[in-house]
Image (spheres, rainbow, N blue to C red):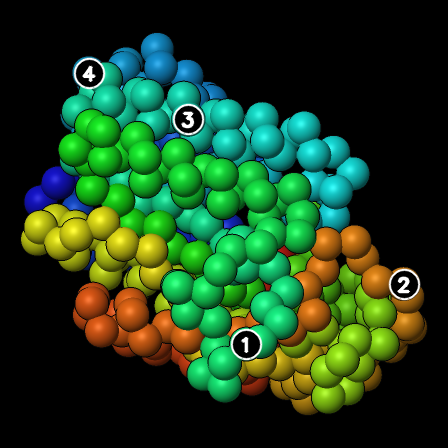
Amino acid sequence: MEKVLITGAAGYIGSHTLRVILESGRSVIALDDFSTGNRWAIPAEVPLFEGDFSDLGLLRNIHRESPFDTIIHFAAKTSVEESVRDPSLYYSENTAKTIRLLDACRVLSIKNFIYSSTCAVYGSVKSMKSDGVNEGTPVNPESPYGWSKYLSERCITDIAQSVGMKYSILRYFNVAGAHPDGSLGAENPKVRAMVTVAAEAAASMSPSLIINGDDYATRDGTCERDYIHVLDLAYAHLSALKRLESGGSSEVFNCGYGKAFSVKDIIATMSKVSGKEIKSTIGKRRSGDLESIFADSRKIRTLTDWLPRFDDISEICRSAYLWEISDREK
């Protein structure tokens, strides 16, 4: 089997995916600058390199020491709110550096490239179909974060075609939850994902929870999202990898369950699974937040062997809560 380099391997999604790829019998190399990642998330047996994923010299050295054929690219800035405050940071870190990574792929003759993208590229879909947003839905990012990821997608498709590299672009919907064995979970204070915020509130790590707007055109006035368990997303990467290894074509895939839960739904579910009352107040809308979005993920289910294993919002919330309790007690 081919050897895989994972950028951002010590992060939330990267560490779960690294574990899944490793358990599949493949050799894995971890690369992270540890700006937000955690060393403890990398198994001791995995070769670990610290540095900038866009550094050609570093990538040459890694490739010389441990040749790899595939890159799974997670490393990125991921806060919509931060991207609105500092757009140049996001275009620099997410887009410009990805271009340099793609240039390195050409130099190193990389065969396969899997990219961590986002449903934020779609923006607020005005006429969303009853079965959700599919990969053919026109893109319309509403934040610098969304644009930085979509521009990276365009660079991947164009550069990969020019050098003969295959790719899979995975557009994540809202990633949540933690590893069932309690060993991995969300650990980035700059990314305020709703399930994590609710889990922290239930674990009494936050005095209260702020709902950013309750005047959206949704059934309860709060934003609605499609929440996918982080481990199911990790398995989606493995399925995309297997497809590329077997000669499959380059594709874009949505990764979600095809159902939307509101902010209030998450608070109510987290309260139920934790047995804790979660206090909340209504705040202002955040710039760049989408009103409602959920995935049509039939394409990845059809073209790969991916099947969700953790499609249960109660289990997603429970795993996130148990992680917060475990982490808080360490």
Report the disc number at residue 284.
2
Q: Work out whether mark 1 precedes mark 2 in sequence or the reverse, and give the earlier one.
A: 1
Q: Work out whether mark 1 precedes mark 4 in sequence or the reverse, and give the earlier one.
A: 4
Q: Is residue 265 left or right of residue 63?
A: right
Q: Amino acid at mark 1?
A: Met
65 or 55, which is in the foreground?
55
Quadrant placement of the C terminus: bottom right
Report the disc number at residue 99.
3
Q: Work out whether mark 3 precedes mark 1 in sequence or the reverse, and give the earlier one.
A: 3
Question: Considering the numbered disc 4 on the image, is that residue within a helix, a strand or a loop?
Answer: helix
Residue drawn at (49%, 45%) of the image: 150
Q: CA distance from mark 1 to mark 2?
A: 25 Å
The reply to whether dot 3 and dot 1 touch (C-beta < 8 Å) is: no
Q: Is residue 200 left or right of residue 111?
A: right
Quadrant placement of the N terminus: top left
Q: Work out whether mark 3 precedes mark 4 in sequence or the reverse, and give the earlier one.
A: 4
Q: CA distance from mark 2 to mark 4?
A: 51 Å
Residue 260 drawn above or below residue 71: below
User: Circle 1 is placed at which residue position?
Assistant: 128
Q: Amino acid at mark 4?
A: Arg
Tell me the mark number nearer the camera, choosing from 1 and 2. Answer: 1
Q: CA distance from mark 1 to mark 4?
A: 48 Å
The answer to whether one can see residue 201 in this image is yes
